[in-house]
Amino acid sequence: MARERSAAAGGRVAGVDGGAKGRYHCAMNVPDLSLHEAFLRRAVELSRRSLETGEGGPFGAVVVRDGKVLAEAWNRVVAASDPTAHAEVLAIREACRSVADFQLPGSILYSSCEPCPMCLSAAYWARVERIYYANTREEAAAIGFCDAELYRELSLPGDRRRVPAMRLNLDGAFEPMRLWAELPGRILY
């Protein structure tokens, strides 16, 4: 059941029990900093939910546009048996579904921790306008999450990474890409 509360009332933003569905409203007369802090506190609360449920790591995320929560999620990597089920990715997916668009222009992502490279990429692909986070990637690394290693790996040439990536020349491989580029009305993203 959705609960609506003003960000000014107790510094808490409304949530949905058991999932990231619905729309929420927040008092817009709250100074911007207080509003950002309220949404960020909600992301931290969701990270605690992940701990309580045992569904994944201690991470939560909220996607907001025009002062309204489009979606929120916590990490579900373990429960979903899905290494991509990070809080930010799940929140972005749900936010896109809620607005029936694969882009989220004008939206803000609030995360309990600095996004990992995958989550950061998802935010870029979704055209998120800004990201606020509470904990750093160094703090995540200190408790066993390998974000620092991933950032380091991405700076290396593909063949020198721990998981090597190498191009194999394959006849005809570019044909689907060429055909797509010629499609009238194709949707760029």
Image (cartoon, helix red, strand yellow):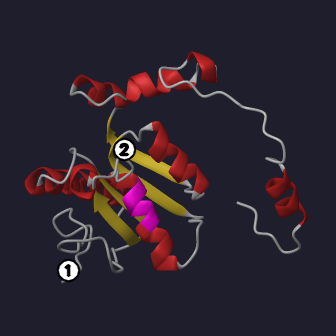
Which image quadrant is residue 104 in? bottom right
| Amino acid at the residue labelled 2 | Tyr
Please count the marks in the image.
2
Element type where label 1 sits in the image: loop
Tell me which secondary structure the magenta stretch mostly adopts: helix
In this rendering, would 117 be left or right of 25? right
Residue depicted at x 51% and y 78% = 99
Vertical placement of residue 155 versus 92, above or below: above
In this view, the residue farthest toward the bottom is 1
- Residue bounds of the magenta highlight: 89-93
- In this picture, is 136 found above or below 149? below
How far from the left and from the top, in percent, is residue 52? Answer: 8, 55
- Give the Cα separation between the discs numbered 2 and 1: 24 Å
Question: Which residue is at the front of the view, 4 or 171?
Answer: 171
Residue 159 or 39: which is nearer the viewer?
Answer: 159
Q: Secondary structure at mark 2?
A: strand
Q: Is residue 142 magenta?
A: no
Residue corresponding to mark 1: 3
Quarter in which the C terminus is drawn: bottom right
Residue at figure coordinates x 60%, y 57% from the top left = 127
At 84% across and 48% down in the image, what residue appears? 172
Residue 25 marker = none
Residue 176 pos. (x, y %)? 80, 57
Q: Residue furthest front?
A: 171
- Which of the 4 image quadrants contains residue 114? top left
* Residue that carries the numbered disc 2 in the rendered image: 133
